[in-house]
């Protein structure tokens, strides 16, 4: 009887964990449409054109009196958004761990970002400042929400399941991105048939991403559960919480070494994601339909790539698999520098290469980091991780924008990003992952 009770309890616990995992996947399904349709495809070229409408005879706009080349405004706005996220994320992460109430904070961040994205419907004419402000709010809110979302991973998946669970989450996100991009492509390509101008179609695509984000966020908010913590009820000021987080992280130098490596190579990944459509439209002279099709190809192949790299990680370890993906990123960017203008086929080949390594490198980095987080510190540590993911990824867009401003060439801007992958590879290769997991007080999986 006692054995039956234990088995029933174990089965019930496993069923509850699976239910939470399925709800967790759906936040990737909800928010990835923002990353794909807004940040990667539509907003870069569109905001650049809106800034161009407001530019002076020399091609400059003047936000707050500062001269900025219109072609760099989008990149600078991305940089400002992630600097804002750097300030906010550690405070929210510390509050989440202290109170154990991640879910309300996740909902607040998600719906702030969704509302700002839906507000992009009103971005037209020469309202580049409105576009920059909405981008800053939406991107910062997305970073905060993703930090909270990622911090659930070590709580809903035991060590042996994390590579697979993380990879499925990314696959869900890329599947949603593919589905919505198909609808975007139909609407944009046949905008006249729907009684819309080209700019109106873009604005509808931007706003619909916000509505999608808000609607599907309801699923994880219903299925994920808050967990009480031993630190619940302990009050601390925001600055003191931030200082305590970094003091605690200094006791785990190998975790910090992994974060440094991830900060560097992921800065390159995030910059490629956010600036690829600008490169395609401005340097290669490709139309919006071509760019949407290329990004759709990335999304479709990223689903397969995430699952395939999850399989490789089970056989060869997550660290080796991520290192291999960084070699592929370097080769892909090098090839991108030599792409001929006005040749969509070669741009599609480049997109295929990006898609095959994109999802897996991100998913396995997330699951690898989850092993390095001390129990009870998930949100605080994932706030630092998210700084590396999005919050600290200001240097890449800044370098991209400055390189273009100095040289006037997007080819020079894109090739400058190779340094992030080369340096990131060297730093990650030097991290003793097994020892880092042991130092964090966590069990070491058989293959890591």
Image (tube, helix red, strand yellow):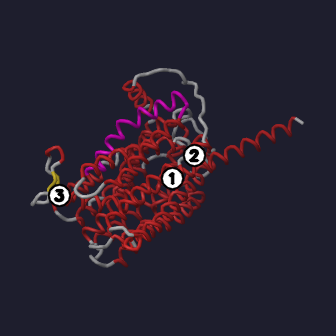
Of residue 273 and residue 210, the one placed in the foreground of this image is 210
Measured as percent of width and height from the top left, residue 185 is found at 42, 69
Residue 34 shown left or right of residue 15 in the figure: left
Q: Which class describes the residues within 10 Å of circle 3: few (<14), some (14-19), or many (20+)?
A: some
Q: Earlier in the sequence, mark 1 or mark 3?
A: 1
- Pair 2/3: label in front: 2
Rendered location of residue 345, percent (x, y): 37, 79
Residue bearing the label numbered 1: 30
- Residue at (71% x, 45% y) in the render: 14
Measured in 3D between alpha carbons, the distance from the residue under mark 2 to the one under mark 1, in whole angstroms, is 9 Å
Describe the element under mark 2 as helix, strand or loop.
Answer: helix
Asked if disc 2 and disc 1 are in contact, CB closer than 8 Å, the reply is yes
Question: Which of 316 and 354 lies nearest the eye of the viewer?
Answer: 354
Q: Quadrant of residue 421?
A: bottom left
Q: 334 or 106, which lies in front?
A: 106
Q: Position of residue 116 (x, y in %)?
A: 38, 47
| Sequence-earlier tag: 2 or 3 | 2
- Residue 98 highlighted magenta (yes or no): yes
Q: Which residue is mark 3?
A: 405
- Quadrant of image for the N terminus: top right
Residue bounds of the magenta highlight = 76-101
Q: Residue at x 61, y 43 (%)?
A: 222
Mark 2 → mark 3, Cα distance in angstroms: 42 Å
Which is nearer the N-term, disc 2 or disc 1? 1
Q: Quadrant of residue 226?
A: top right
Residue 220: mark: 2
- At mark 1, the secondary structure is helix
Residue at horizontal 28 percent and vertical 57 percent from the top = 124
Label placed on residue 277? none
Distance from label 1 to label 3 (Cα)? 35 Å
């Amino acid at each position: 009887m006692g054995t039956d009770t234990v088995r029933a309890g174990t089965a019930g616990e496993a069923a509850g964990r699976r239910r939470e995992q399925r709800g967790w996947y759906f936040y990737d399904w909800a928010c990835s449409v923002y990353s794909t349709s807004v940040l990667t495809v539509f907003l870069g070229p569109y905001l650049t054109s809106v800034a161009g409408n407001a530019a002076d005879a020399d091609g400059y706009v003047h936000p707050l009196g500062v001269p900025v080349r219109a072609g760099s405004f989008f990149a600078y706005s991305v940089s400002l958004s992630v600097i804002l996220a750097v300030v906010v994320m550690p405070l929210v992460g510390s509050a989440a761990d202290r109170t154990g109430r991640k879910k309300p904070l996740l909902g607040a961040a998600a719906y702030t970002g969704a509302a700002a994205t839906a507000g992009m419907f009103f971005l037209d004419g020469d309202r580049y400042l409105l576009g920059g402000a909405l981008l800053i709010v939406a991107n910062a809110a997305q970073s905060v929400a993703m930090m909270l979302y990622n911090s659930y991973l070590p709580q809903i998946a035991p060590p042996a399941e994390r590579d697979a669970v993380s990879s499925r989450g990314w696959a869900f996100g890329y599947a949603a991105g593919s589905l919505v991009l198909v609808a975007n492509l139909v609407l944009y390509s046949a905008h006249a048939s729907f009684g819309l101008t080209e700019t109106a179609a873009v604005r509808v695509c931007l706003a619909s991403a916000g509505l999608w984000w808000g609607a599907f966020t309801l699923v994880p908010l219903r299925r994920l559960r808050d967990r009480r913590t031993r630190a619940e009820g302990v009050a601390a000021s925001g600055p003191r919480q931030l200082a305590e987080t970094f003091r605690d992280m200094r006791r785990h130098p190998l975790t910090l070494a992994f974060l440094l490596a991830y900060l560097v190579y992921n800065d390159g990944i995030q910059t490629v994601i956010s600036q690829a459509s600008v490169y395609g439209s401005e340097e290669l002279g490709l139309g919006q339909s071509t760019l949407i099709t290329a990004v759709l190809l990335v999304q479709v192949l990223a689903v397969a790539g995430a699952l395939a790299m999850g399989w490789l990680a089970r056989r060869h370890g997550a660290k080796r698999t991520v290192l291999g993906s960084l070699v592929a990123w370097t080769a892909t960017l090098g090839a991108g520098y030599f792409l001929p203008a006005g040749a969509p086929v070669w741009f599609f080949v480049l997109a295929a290469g990006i898609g095959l390594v994109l999802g897996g490198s991100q998913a396995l980095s997330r699951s690898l980091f989850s092993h390095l987080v001390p129990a009870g510190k998930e949100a605080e540590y994932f706030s630092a991780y998210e700084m590396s993911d999005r919050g600290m990824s200001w240097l890449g867009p800044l370098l991209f924008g400055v390189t273009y401003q100095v040289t006037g060439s997007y080819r020079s801007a894109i090739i400058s990003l190779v340094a992030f992958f080369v340096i990131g590879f060297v730093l990650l290769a030097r991290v003793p992952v097994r020892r880092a997991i042991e130092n964090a007080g966590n069990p070491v999986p058989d293959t890591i």
